[in-house]
Image (cartoon, rainbow, N blue to C red):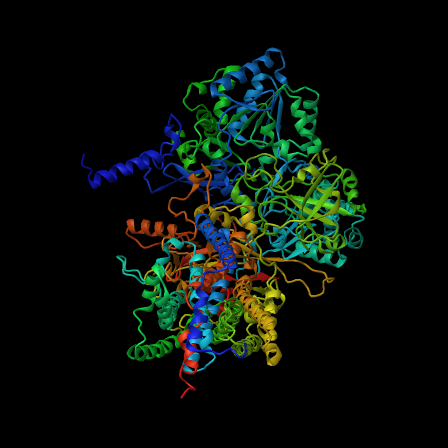
């Protein structure tokens, strides 16, 4: 493919063929994922009717797989904005081919994560009490509670990233609109918002895009910081730590990058996007992953160091418990998967090997899930009062909801891949020579 | 029709009363309500208290039953009754769940030939019964009619005697599985009195228990706990010393300063060794020189060195112990439980009697002036003879009143088979227990809380029982009423049966004669109503009198000689003891008693086999492994509990589980320990052998999850339960008196740096002081909390998942085991009642997103159930882990729901709940004070846990009132006060006083 000549029209053609009538594997995949979602939804319904007791939580462990998976998905949602907004502001060129998918990961990650605070609530039918809304009793949410901050952080992030996602798509959607018929014409017409491609529109558009990128940038930092404060603001040993905000942000980006890689590689194969998503792009992501691996690894070691250095018996006890207690496998899994395995990316051969990229990304995804699991579950299971220690249990309905959330995410992504352009056409074109170039 | 608001409220109010009050019976006996509160004054929303007597075990504690809108909702101790003076154990409190048990029998039943039950009306039932009885009597076999009861005294007892008299039979069996045969026999030998004496722990300065679990089940545990903690209390000086001797570290044992575990069956030799030391060192008191010499002669062969060989206890230790006891002035030695149960049991108790005699305790701490009526029980040997006559077809009709011998005798005795030889067996019973299920005819009777009656647990304590509410089921009857009706038709006619309430008249008539007997100056009616309100008449003892030692050397030398035999025990010896919650098994159908954990093992809903770690290692048994025990008489399987608190070579089990009938809560939990007992009575005492039985232990290779609530058994070096040595405490107390005491610099003092303002408490701030040195761990407070606060029982599976809902728990910690597993290890247990600490700087409050957890102006961490959305963050952030989540909607099967306290919300699924410091009782106390235009008096408001505590370890009160007891206790015991996890700056309102260790 090396002498494949990219041009404006070729780009349009290549990047809209992704929307052609899907093949059989697509329907099979969507059906399977849909069944997974149904399993999750059924489990949730069962849980609402019966009580949270159908999940495996118990007295010391009030947060278990739901909150673990919640933090996991919020983390996944981080790479999108990072790649599209921060790298945009830094004018990193390789981002243009990958950012659309990354943003989709963000939006769908959040759409998944946002379910979990509801899923884990004992009385989900009154969830709106956590929102500030005017009512007769004058009752407002408690603004001292990190959970309320969380509500704001997640909804803000979901709003901004959705707007950013849709705005970035306007010129591309307009191209599709021009060829679409029937209801598609209406849909794309709405999404294109009357885009004509005039100079005036481009001028406003690019300015607005920078502005939105600037608005989204602090959110990358703030959202996961606030999520981390759900834990750091408590007095639970292993949670109560000032390092949590940067540590969680780094971890979020780490897992997000892994997820983006995991999405891009099959998508590139499925849609023949090799000219657009090149090995160079993937290698750049791999380098980034190496960087975040090192940051999170540093945070892990600092946590251990501080536990030892602080002489705080509760802190020390919890870290010993993590390493050698009931969930030792989760603790060592996160060290191996998140820190050690990505170190292989120092070697160029590994960075450019597709199977290896997949392997590392899968490892990081698993490792990051276990990181959250370790933080949340081990701390609760072994708190201050030894008499009150206890372990949760795995139940089918809780697993159903966790697995269902993964199905939900990929289900949304598959729908997206067949309805919207997965690579930004207009930004790819920006990187190309104009049509008349070289024919002066 | 226009309905005005006022009319609506009137109708609503009327309807509520109408539905709540009438209960079910057609006729409403007026005298249900004692004079103090005439029945017109049953005001909805106002409690009425009725006095009575607890009939859950033979101890006969006084009770107060709280009745709201015509329904009994709580049972507490009666402060006027000298047996328990105001506290009540778990079993007594759970009597409510007998009353409202969903498995109560509601109709008379007759067994069809195919074994199924035919439901009869009462008229049919009585006719049938009379016909059968008349048949027997006409055949001239009236003397083949027998009646079996548990321990009864007073009217019902007299009525049964009347009946048997009328039919011309003398076959009356008073049977309790725990009948103290050996104690009676030893006392007959020693003092010529086959009686169970009363024990005065309160004035003893040295307490020595040989296996008698007097804080749990032995004779009168509530009263003994009260006396025990009183004499043990630290009051600027050390309290009484207490040593426990026995093969198993029971709850009673772990409260001792020292636990000594000699070889099983040799405890009597240890007592003899002590007698020898005291006599040879000339420390004996209260006996003549001649007696002294005679007794000394009996101790030949029990010199400390020789006793060391028999018991395995160091001679030096025996000498120290003996001299300490002799020097204490007032002391007491008691024996029972696990040290008995072999043919040496009478010898052991005789040796203990000797020890008490030479220490001058007889007539002082061991008192025969107020013996227990339990002494009148027949022995197990009598029962076995009776079973023989059943087998031989000598019994044509057998009546049971509230007794369950099919369960509580060894199956090898084959009581079930003997019953098949009795043509007519009639059970007066409230529950389908094992015996009732085997009977041919069942008459459903009222529970004690619905019945008239009287009970005299010890001489001079005449308890009076009254129905506290309308019968729960309209189709049950009072045993007494039925009996009078039968008596009347068979024997002589009395006036009682024509009365509307025959048994009530009978009781009253009997009390009338008591009134004459006492020579009371007061008019009878007045005296009677007063007795009713007080729960009985309690006459002081005529004064202690000396009982002479009557044992002759010739008689004793043979008995005591048995103690010298150092038998080689079998590989394993089984010791068993009644369970603190289930007693001999009769508590098993009360869900609270199943769910409130056993204090030592913290296991719920089932039983277990205790085995020493070294033995467990040998057999490769781990905690929870299914173990099979085999004796010559039976086999059972139960999970193992590896426990350093049993002597190596001993396996221990609690009695009470393993019911095959007895309702949904009792059935299928654990194994029936009676199955292992030999059917033959012990030759020395005539008692049942339930300890020191040779047993084979086999690991079944299966594993089950124990439903225990303890996360960890150890403190892991954490300073959650704090202990102070007596020397250190005496030094600090001296400093305190001299004004030189300096408090340790601690965190958690008000005024610590905080972003937020301190809470202000304008009127009250409620607080608690809990004395860990007093707490025995009995868990009566836990049951009280369940009863008061409508805490659901979740069942075995949910407990296994860690979802029990107890707001108050007794945390039991064993001393951390030594690093070297081979080192000797004394697993002393500490108890910590853990409840919401009502922190002033509460971690639960700020994290709640919806203000469901908030701080009241009186310093309580309130939980607003209606507002809770169920994020569980408050529970995660609670360092004490005292918050409880409603994982489901929990059920109270009809009519158990009638017990629910109407002052407390029943929580729905998805909300958090926790200890409220019994806010409903606080509000009631404040309202009462307000109505009377005064401020709340200290001690007026008690929490349920405080009220129940027999040890009086819990004191609740207003921290704003400097004169309140809760403050004064803190001030007086400053060196002992600490807050749990103080360094977290949660500023709890609960201060614990450190446990004292000598």
Q: Is residue A380 left or right of residue A125?
A: right
In this rendering, is residue B594 above or below A22?
above
Residue at figure coordinates x 45%, y 20% from the top left: B496
Quick one: quadrant of the C terminus of chain B? bottom right
Which residue appears farthest toward the left when viewing the image?
A: B2
Residue B965 on image: x %, y %: 43, 58
Is residue B564 among the parts visible in the rendering?
yes
- Residue B835 in the image: state x and y as whole percent: 48, 57
The quarter of the picture where residue B847 lies is: bottom left
Q: Residue B726's quadrant in the figure?
A: bottom right
* Residue plotted at (39% across, 48% down): B905
The percent position of residue A85, horizontal first and vertical second, equals 41, 77
Reply above or below: B268 against B990.
above
Front residue of B80/B776: it is B776
Residues B50 and A92: in front is A92
Q: Up-down: is B494 above or below B790?
A: above
- Extreme-bottom residue of the structure: A440
Towards the viewer: B990 or A244: A244
Relative depth, front residue between B157 and B297: B157
- Name the residue located 49 percent from the left edge and 79 percent from the top edge: A5
Is residue B743 visible in the rendered structure shown here? no
Q: Is residue B38 left or right of residue B286?
A: left
Q: Position of residue A24 (x, y in %)?
A: 51, 57
């Amino acid at each position: 493919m090396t002498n494949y000549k990219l041009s404006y029209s070729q780009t349009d053609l290549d990047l809209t063929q992704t929307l052609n009538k899907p093949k059989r594997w697509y329907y099979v995949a969507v059906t399977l994922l849909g069944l997974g979602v149904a399993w999750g939804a059924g489990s949730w319904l069962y849980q609402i009717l019966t009580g949270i007791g159908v999940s495996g939580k118990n007295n010391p462990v009030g947060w278990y797989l739901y909150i673990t998976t919640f933090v996991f998905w919020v983390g996944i949602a981080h790479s999108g904005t990072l790649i599209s907004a921060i790298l945009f502001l830094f004018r990193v060129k390789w981002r243009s081919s990958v950012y659309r998918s990354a943003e989709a990961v963000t939006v769908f990650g959040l759409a998944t994560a946002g379910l979990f605070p509801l899923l884990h609530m004992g009385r989900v039918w009154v969830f709106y009490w956590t929102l500030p809304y005017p009512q007769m009793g004058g009752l407002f949410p408690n603004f001292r509670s990190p959970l309320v901050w969380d509500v704001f952080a997640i909804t803000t992030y979901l709003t901004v990233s959705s707007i950013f996602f849709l705005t970035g798509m306007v010129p591309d959607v307009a191209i599709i609109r021009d060829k679409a018929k029937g209801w598609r014409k209406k849909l794309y017409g709405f999404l294109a918002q009357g885009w004509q491609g005039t100079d005036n529109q481009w001028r406003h558009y690019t300015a607005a895009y920078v502005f939105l990128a600037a608005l989204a940038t602090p959110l990358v930092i703030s959202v996961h910081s606030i999520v981390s404060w759900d834990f750091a603001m408590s007095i639970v040993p292993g949670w109560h730590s000032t390092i949590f905000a940067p540590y969680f942000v780094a971890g979020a980006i780490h897992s997000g990058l892994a997820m983006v890689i995991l999405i891009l590689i099959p998508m590139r194969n499925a849609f023949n996007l090799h000219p657009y998503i090149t090995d160079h792009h993937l290698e750049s992501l791999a380098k980034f992953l190496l960087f975040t691996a090192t940051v999170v690894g540093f945070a892990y070691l600092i946590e251990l160091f501080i536990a030892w250095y602080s002489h705080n018996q509760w802190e020390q006890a919890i870290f010993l418990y993590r390493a050698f207690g009931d969930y030792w496998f989760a603790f060592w899994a996160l060290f191996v998967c998140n820190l050690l395995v990505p170190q292989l990316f120092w070697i160029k051969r590994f960075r450019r090997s597709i199977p290896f990229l997949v392997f590392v990304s899968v490892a990081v995804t698993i490792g990051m899930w276990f990181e959250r699991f370790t933080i949340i579950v081990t701390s609760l299971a072994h708190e201050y009062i030894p008499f009150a220690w206890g372990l949760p249990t795995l139940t089918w309905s809780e697993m159903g909801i966790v697995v269902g959330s993964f199905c939900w995410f990929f289900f949304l992504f598959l729908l997206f891949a067949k309805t919207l352009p997965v690579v930004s056409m207009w930004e790819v074109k920006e990187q190309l020579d104009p049509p008349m170039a070289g024919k002066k | 029709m226009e309905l005005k608001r006022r009319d609506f409220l009137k109708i609503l109010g009327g309807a509520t009363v109408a539905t709540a009050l009438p209960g079910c019976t057609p006729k409403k006996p007026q005298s249900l309500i004692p004079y103090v509160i005439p029945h017109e004054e049953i005001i909805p929303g106002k409690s009425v208290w009725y006095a009575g007597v607890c009939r859950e075990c033979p101890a006969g504690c006084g009770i107060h039953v709280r009745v709201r809108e015509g329904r009994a909702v709580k049972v507490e101790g009666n402060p006027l009754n000298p047996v328990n003076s105001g506290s009540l154990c778990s079993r007594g409190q759970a009597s409510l769940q007998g009353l409202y048990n969903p498995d109560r029998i509601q109709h008379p039943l007759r067994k069809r030939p195919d074994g199924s039950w035919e439901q009869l009306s009462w008229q049919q039932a009585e006719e049938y019964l009379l016909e059968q009885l008349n048949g027997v009597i006409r055949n001239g076999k009236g003397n083949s009619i027998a009646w079996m009861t548990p321990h009864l005294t007073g009217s019902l007892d007299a009525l049964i005697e009347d009946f048997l008299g009328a039919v011309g039979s003398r076959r009356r069996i008073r049977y309790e599985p725990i009948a103290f045969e050996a104690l009676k026999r030893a006392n007959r030998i020693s003092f010529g009195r086959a009686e169970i004496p009363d024990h005065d722990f309160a004035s003893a300065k040295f307490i020595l228990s040989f296996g008698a679990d007097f804080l749990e089940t032995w004779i009168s545990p509530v009263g003994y706990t009260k006396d025990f903690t009183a004499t043990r209390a630290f009051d600027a000086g050390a309290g009484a010393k207490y040593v426990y001797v026995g093969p198993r570290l029971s709850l009673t044992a772990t409260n001792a300063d020292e636990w000594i575990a000699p070889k099983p069956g040799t405890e009597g030799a240890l007592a003899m060794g002590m007698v020898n030391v005291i006599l040879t060192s000339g420390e004996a008191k209260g006996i003549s020189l001649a007696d002294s010499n005679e007794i000394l002669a009996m101790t030949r062969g029990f010199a400390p060195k020789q006793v060391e060989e028999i018991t395995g206890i160091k001679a030096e230790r025996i000498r120290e112990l003996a001299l300490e006891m002799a020097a204490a002035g007032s002391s007491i030695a008691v024996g029972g439980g696990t040290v008995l149960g072999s043919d040496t049991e009478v010898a052991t108790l005789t040796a203990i009697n000797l020890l008490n005699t030479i220490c001058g305790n007889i007539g002082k701490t061991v008192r025969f002036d107020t013996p227990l009526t339990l002494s009148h029980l027949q022995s197990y040997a009598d029962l076995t003879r009776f079973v023989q006559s059943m087998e031989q077809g000598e019994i044509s009709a057998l009546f049971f009143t509230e007794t369950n011998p099919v369960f509580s005798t060894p199956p090898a005795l084959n009581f079930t088979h003997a019953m098949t030889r009795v043509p007519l067996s009639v059970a007066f019973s409230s529950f389908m227990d094992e015996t009732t299920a085997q009977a041919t005819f069942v008459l459903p009777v009222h529970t004690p809380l619905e019945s008239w009656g009287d009970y005299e647990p010890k001489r001079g304590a005449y308890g009076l029982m009254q129905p506290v509410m309308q019968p729960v089921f309209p189709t049950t009857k009072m045993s007494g009423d039925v009996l009078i009706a039968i008596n009347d038709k068979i024997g002589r006619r009395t006036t009682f049966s024509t009365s509307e309430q025959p048994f009530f008249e009978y009781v009253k008539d009997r009390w009338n004669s008591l009134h004459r007997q006492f020579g009371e100056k007061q008019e009878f009616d007045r005296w009677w109503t007063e007795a009713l309100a007080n729960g009985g008449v309690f006459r002081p003892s005529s004064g202690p009198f000396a009982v002479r030692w009557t044992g002759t050397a010739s008689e004793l030398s043979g008995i005591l000689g048995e103690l010298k035999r150092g038998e080689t025990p079998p590989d394993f010896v089984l010791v068993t003891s009644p369970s603190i919650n289930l007693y001999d098994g009769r508590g098993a159908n009360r869900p609270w008693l199943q769910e409130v954990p056993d204090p030592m093992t913290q296991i719920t809903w089932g039983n277990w086999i205790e085995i020493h770690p070294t033995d467990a290692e040998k057999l490769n048994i781990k905690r929870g492994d299914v173990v099979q025990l085999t004796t010559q008489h039976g086999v059972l399987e139960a999970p193992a509990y590896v426990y350093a608190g049993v002597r190596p070579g001993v396996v221990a089990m609690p009695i009470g589980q393993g019911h095959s009938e007895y309702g949904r809560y009792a059935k299928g939990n654990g194994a029936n320990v009676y199955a292992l007992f030999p059917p033959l009575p012990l030759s020395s005492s005539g008692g049942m052998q339930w300890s020191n039985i040779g047993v084979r232990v086999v690991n079944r290779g299966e594993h089950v999850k124990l439903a225990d609530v303890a996360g960890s058994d150890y403190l892991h070096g954490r300073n959650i339960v704090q202990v102070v040595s007596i020397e250190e405490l005496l030094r600090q107390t001296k400093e305190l008196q001299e004004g030189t005491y300096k408090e340790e610099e601690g965190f958690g003092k008000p005024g610590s740096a905080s972003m937020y303002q301190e809470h202000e408490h304008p009127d009250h701030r409620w607080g608690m002081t809990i004395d860990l040195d007093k707490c025995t761990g009995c868990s009566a407070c836990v049951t009280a909390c369940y009863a008061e606060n409508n805490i659901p029982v979740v069942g075995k599976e949910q407990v296994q998942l860690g979802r029990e809902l107890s707001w108050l728990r007794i945390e039991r910690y064993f001393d951390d085991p030594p690093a070297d597993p081979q080192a000797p290890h004394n697993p002393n247990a500490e108890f910590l009642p853990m409840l919401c600490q009502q922190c002033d700087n509460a971690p639960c409050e700020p994290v709640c997103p919806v203000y469901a957890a908030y701080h009241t102006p009186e310093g309580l961490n309130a939980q607003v159930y209606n507002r809770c959305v169920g994020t569980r963050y408050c529970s995660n952030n609670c360092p004490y882990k005292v918050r409880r989540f409603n994982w489901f909607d929990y059920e109270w099967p009809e009519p158990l729901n009638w017990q629910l306290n109407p002052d407390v919300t029943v929580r729905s699924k998805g909300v958090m709940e926790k200890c409220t410091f019994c806010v409903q009782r606080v509000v009631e106390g404040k309202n009462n004070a307000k109505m009377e235009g005064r401020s709340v008096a200290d001690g007026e408001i008690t929490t349920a846990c405080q009220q129940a505590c027999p040890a009086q370890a819990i004191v609740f009160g207003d921290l704003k009132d400097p004169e309140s007891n809760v403050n004064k206790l803190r001030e007086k015991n400053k060196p002992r006060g600490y807050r749990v996890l103080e360094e977290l700056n949660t500023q709890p309102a609960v201060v614990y006083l450190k446990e004292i260790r000598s």
